[in-house]
């Protein structure tokens, strides 16, 4: 999960270089990102796990829900950044772990411990600080921006929960191939209302390849593997470590200085993750003692 977050954190770098080197809208980039990711993952399934393309009819609702919520999440995320700005959209996104924790508790009876609740609180508070309080204070959120902002964590939670269910019967590569395929279909209608970037300069293709291979195909594969091994509530909290990681990348690669508030926010997010890690180590130790 932490490796997935570290790779997701590079997406902002690649997106910035793609947008600077070519004229592409957020909606168009989301569609082409999903489509090319689907092609890459499908090629991997065909080469290494051709039998994985068989789908049981009873799993179709989960696969459609996974891919559809993934595609719609990208739409909400792009609209949220356009309407509210990246800082506000990031904070709105950070409500996702709480939604997943409650939904997983109600649907699958995952434990909702005080450790998880405190980790969610620390993660959310850290996200607010990392997202830059000055930018949040200057933001003006309209009613439409507020509604779109509510859709960001809901659809993020949706594809995490659906993905957890899909991973029970399918491998990470197969799950994501189906998911990104359906996601690209969900984004396709929006392409008729946004300019397309063709022809694309060669340098943009290079940055786009990094976005697909590192930030998407590999990162989502790591996340899918983690979903198969961890409770959905824990996975969703760990995914939020992407936010302080992005701040570190911006500091190292883009020479963007981190403020004291952002450093404190990163510490809070890491503290939430360590709290979960400590709880899991304790549970593993108790299980080992019982076995002995």
Image (tube, rainbow, N blue to C red):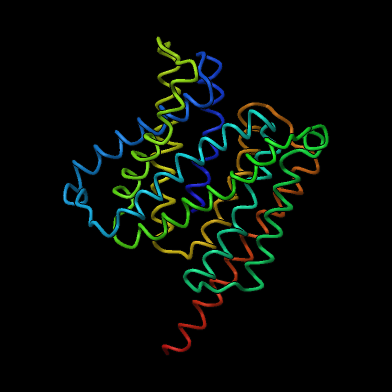
**286 vs 158: above or below:** below
Q: Is residue 285 left or right of residue 225?
A: right
Can you give x and y, in whole percent of width and height, for residue 90 in the image? 65, 41
Quarter in which the C terminus is drawn: bottom left
**Which residue occupies the foreground of this view, 58 or 97?**
58
Can you give x and y, in whole percent of width and height, for residue 41 in the image? 30, 39
Can you give x and y, in whole percent of width and height, for residue 240 in the image? 59, 50
- The image shows a total of numbered marks equal to 0
Can you give x and y, in whole percent of width and height, for residue 181 in the image? 33, 38
**49 vs 140: above or below:** below
**Which residue occupies the foreground of this view, 261 or 93?**
93
**Which residue occupies the foreground of this view, 241 or 28?**
28
Q: Residue at x 45, y 83 (%)?
A: 288
Q: Is residue 288 left or right of residue 49?
A: right
Q: Residue at x 56, y 24 (%)?
A: 16
Q: Residue at x 64, y 49 (%)?
A: 94
Quadrant in which residue 228 is drawn: bottom left
Q: Residue at x 50, y 27 (%)?
A: 27
**120 vs 67: above or below:** below
């Amino acid at each position: 999960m932490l490796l997935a977050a570290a790779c997701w954190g590079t997406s902002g770098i690649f997106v910035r270089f793609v947008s600077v080197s070519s004229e592409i809208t957020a909606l168009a980039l989301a569609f082409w990102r999903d489509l090319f990711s689907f092609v890459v993952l499908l090629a991997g399934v065909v080469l290494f796990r051709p039998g994985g393309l068989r789908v049981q009819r009873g799993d179709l609702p989960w696969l459609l829900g996974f891919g559809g919520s993934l595609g719609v999440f990208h739409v909400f995320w792009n609209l949220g950044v356009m309407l509210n700005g990246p800082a506000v959209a990031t904070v709105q996104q950070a409500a996702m772990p709480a939604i997943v924790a409650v939904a997983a508790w109600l649907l699958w009876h995952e434990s909702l411990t005080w450790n998880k609740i405190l980790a969610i609180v620390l993660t959310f508070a850290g996200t607010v600080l990392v997202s830059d309080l000055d930018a949040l204070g200057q933001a003006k959120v309209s009613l439409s921006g507020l509604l779109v902002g509510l859709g960001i964590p809901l659809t993020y939670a949706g594809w995490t929960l659906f993905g957890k269910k899909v991973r029970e019967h399918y491998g990470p590569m197969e799950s994501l191939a189906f998911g990104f395929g359906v996601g690209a279909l969900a984004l396709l209608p929006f392409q008729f209302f946004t300019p397309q970037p063709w022809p694309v300069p060669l340098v943009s293709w290079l940055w786009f390849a990094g976005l697909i291979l590192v930030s998407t195909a590999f990162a989502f594969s790591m996340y899918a593997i983690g979903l198969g091994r961890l409770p959905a509530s824990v996975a969703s909290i760990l995914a939020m470590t992407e936010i302080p990681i992005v701040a570190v990348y911006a500091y190292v690669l883009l020479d963007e200085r981190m403020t004291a508030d952002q450093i404190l926010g990163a510490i809070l997010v890491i503290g939430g993750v360590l709290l979960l890690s400590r709880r899991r180590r304790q549970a593993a130790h108790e299980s080992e003692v019982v076995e002995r």
